[in-house]
Image (cartoon, helix red, strand yellow):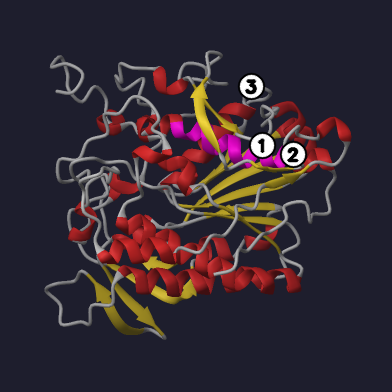
Amino acid sequence: MRTLRIDYLKHKFGYNHKNLLLNLVLTIFLFGLASKFVFFHSLSPEISPDLEHPFAEKTNTDPVTENQTTLSEQVPQLAPVLEHVFQNEDQVSPSNKKCDYFSGDWVPNPVGPVYTNESCNLIESPQNCLKNGRPDKDFLYWKWVPRDCDLPPFDPYKFLNAMRNKKWALIGDSISRNHVQSLLCMLSTVEQPVLVYHDEEYKSKSWHFPSYNFNISVIWSPFLVEAAIFEDFNGVSSSEVELYLDKLDGKWKDQFLNFDYIIISCGKWFLKSAIYYENDTILGCHYCNKKNLTELGFNFAYRKSLKFVLNFIASSNHKGTIFFRTFTPDHFENGEWFSGGTCNRKAPVKEDEIEMKYLNKMLRNIELEEFGKVAAKASRSGVNLKLVDLAPLSLLRPDGHPGPYREFHPFGNKGEYG
């Protein structure tokens, strides 16, 4: 399959503005890893047993199934969008005039993070693993370093000045919510944001930076299409999700054109038990064993929904910039969160020490294929739609998950791991 290269610099803004956007997208993700709260805590045990694949590490003795090998080979090699082309001699890398910021390594960073749970009061309890008793802090002292060029540190002053009178939105599930917290913490070193909106459940929120007339919103829409979700405050489901594959979620669709910059994503929620609708008629389901419905599989619904969402964006006449972010792989070992899985790692891993789980490969395969299908359409329509493929980079940080420290001192006085 041919490689699809999308030039990040085909953008109407100047060099400095582009670097600020690059730094923003990468930095909120990288710092977000330090307090990452993935979707598993909100998934019901009423979920496809396919999730119970253990953390797959590469060894010389582990067999590889035919399906896994085939799927891996089928993943289209779409290049990450955030490639920087140097524009003058002062910026030229000694080895290369192009920089792939996604090809790099996690290296020790003795300087430490821009913020911590003590310096920022915007980190919510489930993400605040240090306050919840996590004893180690080494996971805070790493930074991502591209192999062929420098990644300048994110400058919140420059960013806020560049974003005067602008509006940002991050749309998706709890990963997007986590990334918003990280961004707010970095920007709060310049000015404290003011919460100006929240929905009834405090899942969708908006903040305002008065001195810059700058707004940031997080919009809770884990499927991006319309969904009826039946679960309690702890995320325990009482019934299958009812998913309407041909109807966009109005929570983001109705205000889509109001934002200058959008980061949109989805993914793991499609693994939940669900009944699928189209034209208000049941098509089938995923993992609904006790119902007389056709089993279609989560991959059917994910591909169909993502195609619908991306085609809407590509033909939307949106005048700003839209980043489609690939999903974030999970890192549970020896099971999943509901079947004894653990997240006890305390350092990043190398590329040759880990491989992506089978189901994660399936999700990423669908994302890259469907994005590739609409990229040209978006370009012809004048829609600035960009791909940010963070899945391989984030796979290397199993230490970034709070694990049991989503809850306050989960082990009491029993010790670090109970």
Q: Position of residue 275 (x, y in %)?
A: 28, 74
Give me the residue at 32% from left, 68% from top.
Answer: 298
Residue 233 in the image: above or below residue 396: below
Q: Nearer the viewer, residue 368 or 218?
A: 368
Mark 3 sits on what residue?
A: 189
Q: Label 1's element?
A: helix
Question: Badge 1, how many Cα within 10 Å: few under 14, some, many 20+?
Answer: many
Whole-angstrom CA distance, mark 3 to mark 2, is 20 Å
Q: Which residue is mark 2?
A: 19
Count neighbours of disc 2 (C-alpha within 10 A) and say few if under 14, some if 14 to 19, many if 20 or more: some
Q: Which residues are magenta?
A: 19-33
Q: Quickly name the residue at label 1.
A: 23
User: Residue 403's x, y, as percent?
Assistant: 28, 33
Callouts 2 and 1 close, C-beta under 8 Å: yes
Left or right: 78 with respect to 329? right
Work out whether residue 197 or residue 66 is closer to the camera in this orientation and state it: 66
Q: Secondary structure at mark 3?
A: loop
